[in-house]
Image: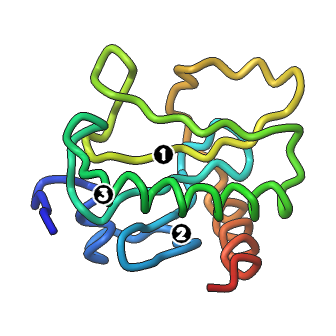
Amino acid sequence: MSKDPDCIFCKIIAGDIPCFRIYEDEDTLAFMDINPANEGHCLVITKEHAANLYKVSDAAISAAARSAKKVAAVVNAVVGPDGINLVQANGEGAEQSVFHFHLHVMPRRIGDELKMNWGHHPGDMERIKALGEEIAAAIGD
């Protein structure tokens, strides 16, 4: 499995940088986004380093989709949003900020006026941690 020693997500996978882990399997890792667009916003990343959709293997993207489905279902049950977006960006023009394939699981509220480029605004770390623990417990795997 490929890795990039300079990639922040590869460092998170290796345990070199902490995160609020909510789910992990052989091929993927899911954790809370610390710059959430909305409460419950989390990321599903492939353990295989690939810069974007064009580079990720079929096996890794399939694993990410399975994990995103599982995580989204639990986030929906725990957070109770009006809907959920799965967002995946490729390249600077799409505002991709970490060049490691990942999916955003983004709970939505009617009228939240969330834009595709929601900006990076640090969230309440204690609230993110508590919600991450609740989601992780509900996933149960």
Residue beneath label 2, please? 20
As rendered, which of 1 and 18 lies closer to the eye? Answer: 1
Kind of residue sitting beneath label 3: Phe
Kind of residue sitting beneath label 2: Phe
Residue farthest along the top direction in this orientation? 93
Task: State the SS at label 3.
Answer: helix
Residue beneath label 3, please? 9
Residue under the point 70% across and 22% down: 114
Expressed as whole percent of the image width and height from the top left, the position of residue 136 reads 66, 76
Residue beneath label 1, please? 103
What's the CA distance linking mark 2 and mark 1? 16 Å
Mark 1, Cα crowd under 10 Å, few <14 / some 14-19 / many 20+, is many
Q: Is residue 25 above or below residue 129?
A: below
Residue under the point 50% across and 64% down: 30
Expressed as whole percent of the image width and height from the top left, the position of residue 13 reads 31, 70
Q: Earlier in the sequence, mark 2 or mark 1?
A: 2
Q: Quadrant of the C terminus?
A: bottom right
Dividing the picture into quarters, in which one does residue 113 lie? Answer: top right
Expressed as whole percent of the image width and height from the top left, the position of residue 102 reads 40, 47
Q: Is residue 122 above or below residue 49?
A: above
Task: State the SS at label 1.
Answer: strand
Kind of residue sitting beneath label 1: Leu
Q: Nearer the viewer, mark 3 or mark 1?
A: 1
Residue under the point 48% across and 56% down: 44
Q: Earlier in the sequence, mark 3 or mark 1?
A: 3
Would residue 81 appear left or right of 41 to someone viewing this image?
right
Expressed as whole percent of the image width and height from the top left, the position of residue 49 reads 21, 56
Would residue 55 appear left or right of 101 to someone viewing this image?
left
As rendered, which of 98 and 54 lies closer to the eye? Answer: 54
Residue under the point 53% across and 69% down: 20
